[in-house]
Structure formats: structure tokens, C-alpha cells
Amino acid sequence: MSNPTIFTVPLGFIGAYLGTVLSKAKEEENKYPEVLFKSNTGFGISSAKDH
């Protein structure tokens, strides 16, 4: 086969989709408002290291 990309790219997208849909990590969805607040205000990130 001279161009395997025809098969591998769609298989990669299907694998990524199935991995996302079948993942059991649903509790991270509840952390989004907290992360958004911290990223916009900087409040609560004082434990971060100085670089």
C-alpha cells in the first residue's frame, strides 16, 4: 500500500472518539468551574512554584 494514511487517520479519530466516550473519568467535568475561576482570577493558586 502506497498511502496507509487513508486507513490510519480515520482509525485514529474513531479510537480517540471511543476513548473519550467510554472513559470513566466523568468527575473531572465538575471541576471545570473551579479551574476557570482560578485561571481568570489567580485566586487559590498561591501554592504554585515560582519559576
Image: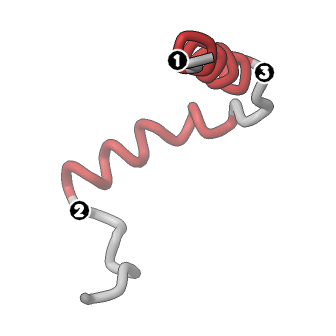
Q: Amino acid at mark 2?
A: Gly
The x, y position of residue 10, in whole percent, is: 58, 12
State the residue position of label 2: 42
The x, y position of residue 21, in whole percent, is: 70, 17
Q: Amino acid at mark 1?
A: Asn
Quadrant of the rendering where the N terminus is positioned: top right
The x, y position of residue 9, in whole percent, is: 54, 19
Horizontal side, residue 32 vs residue 2: left or right = left
State the residue position of label 3: 22
Q: How is the image coloured?
A: secondary structure
Q: Earlier in the sequence, mark 1 or mark 2?
A: 1
- Farthest residue toward the bottom? 50
The x, y position of residue 31, in whole percent, is: 53, 42
Quadrant of the rendering where the C terminus is positioned: bottom left
Residue 2 against residue 49 in the figure, above or below: above
The residue at 35%/67% (across/down) is 44
Q: Amino acid at mark 3?
A: Leu
Name the image quarter holding residue 26. top right
Whether residues under marks 1 and 2 lie with C-beta atoms below 8 angstroms apart, the answer is no
Name the image quarter holding residue 36. top left
Q: Nearer the viewer, residue 29 or 21?
A: 21
Q: CA distance from mark 1 to mark 2?
A: 48 Å
Q: CA distance from mark 3 to mark 1?
A: 30 Å
State the residue position of label 1: 3
Q: Which mark is residue 49?
A: none
Q: Secondary structure at mark 3?
A: loop
Name the image quarter holding residue 45. bottom left
